Image (cartoon, grey):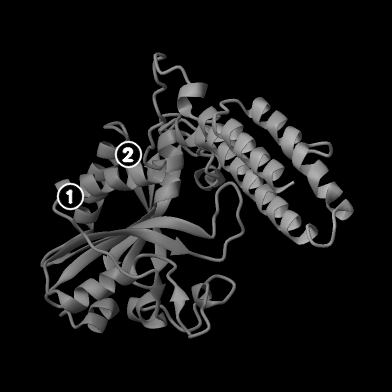
């Protein structure tokens, strides 16, 4: 019986190792380890052996079964890996497919374009943190404690008393604290407000703050800067208008608009029939802001302006829903 088991082991191992086909390998498994397999028959007959023969035969038969099972699994894995080889699945003589190439998000493209235009007018880029203190976001910008923008209905406050900045205007305070005039900066970045998302509002958006401080800076300089910016961004035919307004950190303050590029100022759905698109606020820096940073308001003057990037993008690209910028739909993104 021991000799027979040894013969089965040698025969099985030899046939398994020379096997080159999974179907053939399965047949060998059935031949030796199946319900009617050669080794299975021996294992079933152990009970008929004498008490002296049984231990040796049982031990050897069990060892041979484990060895055959191991080699079957090893050869099976090897043959399966060969079947999954790229050479088996792909025709290497076929031309390849051109991979998709990523693109900058349209808002990033627009911010880059805005930065380039203001670089050409001598402005440098300044940055600041998204998480701000009330001092930089409100107090230093002459925003009183009872101003509606400081309510929790408008601003995201954190547990430590800090907040998510509602505009990039705090950057101008941080720059003026460290730099003496002249100052000529723009501050692009993300902002956050408690707005309910709809076609024209989002709780997070992008803002570009502009600041110019020097001697003899006037409102005419502000309008000239914004006119040049608008015409370089949207074309020579675009006009800019100022409307009186109030902001705590500028005096006098204005809201500024672009003439509608869709209808040429004649009135359409995009501009709601007015011929103008509201962009944001601007004005001459309030002396109280200069006082907060240690500037002499008798010697220096300056203007500040802000703009929402998404709003300009909607005008520039003719988009009627701000939410499209944040849905990550490649069909939308790939158009830019």
Q: CA distance from mark 2 to mark 1?
A: 21 Å
Residue 49: x and y in percent read 85, 53
Residue 26: x and y in percent read 70, 32
Residue that appears at 34% across and 67% down: 169
Q: 34 or 326, which lies in front?
A: 34
Residue that appears at 17% across and 79% down: 295
> Can I make out residue 70 in this image?
yes
Q: Which mark is residue 119?
A: 1
**Mark toward the start of the polypeptide (2 vs 1):** 1
Identify the residue under disc 2: 239
Q: Residues within 10 Å of mark 2 (few under 14, many from 20)?
A: many
Dot 2: element: loop
Q: Which mark is residue 64?
A: none
Dot 1: element: helix
Quadrant of the rendered image containing residue 234: top left
**The C terminus - image quarter:** top left
**Residue found farthest to the right:** 48
Q: Nearer the viewer, mark 2 or mark 1?
A: 1
Pointers 2 and 1 in contact (CB under 8 A)?
no
Quadrant of the rendered image containing residue 8: top right
Looking at the image, is 42 positioned above or below residue 51?
Answer: above
**Is 174 left, or right, of 42 in this rendering?**
left
Quadrant of the rendered image containing residue 183: bottom left
Looking at the image, is 230 positioned above or below residue 55?
Answer: above
Residue that appears at 40% across and 37% down: 316
Residue 133: x and y in percent read 40, 80
Q: 240 or 262, which lies in front?
A: 262
Residue that appears at 22% across and 45% down: 116
Q: Residues within 10 Å of mark 1 (few under 14, many from 20)?
A: some
**Is 194 left, or right, of 165 in this rendering?**
right
Residue 157: x and y in percent read 52, 77
> Can I make out residue 260 in this image?
no
């Amino acid at each position: 019986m021991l000799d027979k088991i040894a013969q089965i082991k040698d025969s099985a191992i030899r046939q398994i190792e020379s096997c080159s086909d999974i179907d053939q390998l399965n047949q060998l498994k059935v031949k030796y380890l199946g319900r009617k397999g050669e080794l299975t028959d021996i294992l079933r007959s152990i009970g008929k052996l004498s008490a002296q023969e049984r231990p040796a035969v049982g031990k050897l038969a069990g060892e041979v079964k484990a060895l055959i099972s191991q080699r079957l699994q090893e050869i099976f894995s090897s043959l399966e890996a060969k079947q999954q080889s790229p050479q088996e699945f792909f025709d290497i003589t076929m031309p390849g497919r051109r991979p998709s190439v990523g693109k900058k998000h349209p808002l990033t493209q627009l911010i880059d374009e805005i930065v380039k235009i203001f670089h050409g007018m001598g402005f440098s880029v300044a940055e600041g943190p998204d998480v701000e203190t009330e001092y930089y976001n409100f107090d230093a910008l002459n925003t009183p404690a009872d101003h509606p923008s400081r309510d929790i209905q408008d601003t995201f406050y954190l547990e430590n008393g800090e907040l998510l900045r509602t505009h990039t205007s705090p950057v101008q305070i941080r720059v003026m604290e460290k730099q003496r005039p002249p100052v000529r900066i723009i501050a692009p970045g993300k902002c956050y407000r408690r707005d309910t998302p709809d076609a024209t509002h989002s709780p997070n958006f992008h803002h570009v703050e502009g600041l110019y401080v020097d001697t003899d800076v006037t409102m005419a300089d502000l309008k000239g800067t914004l006119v040049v910016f608008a015409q370089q961004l949207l074309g020579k035919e675009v006009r800019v208008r100022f409307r009186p307004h109030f902001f705590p950190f500028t005096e006098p303050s204005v809201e500024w608009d672009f003439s509608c590029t869709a209808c040429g100022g004649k009135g359409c759905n995009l501009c709601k029939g007015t011929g103008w698109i509201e962009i944001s606020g601007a004005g001459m820096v309030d002396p109280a802001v200069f006082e907060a940073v240690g500037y002499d308001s008798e010697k220096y003057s300056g203007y500040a302006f802000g703009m929402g990037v998404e709003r300009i993008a909607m005008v520039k690209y003719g988009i009627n829903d701000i939410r499209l910028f944040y849905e990550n739909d490649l069909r939308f993104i790939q158009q830019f």
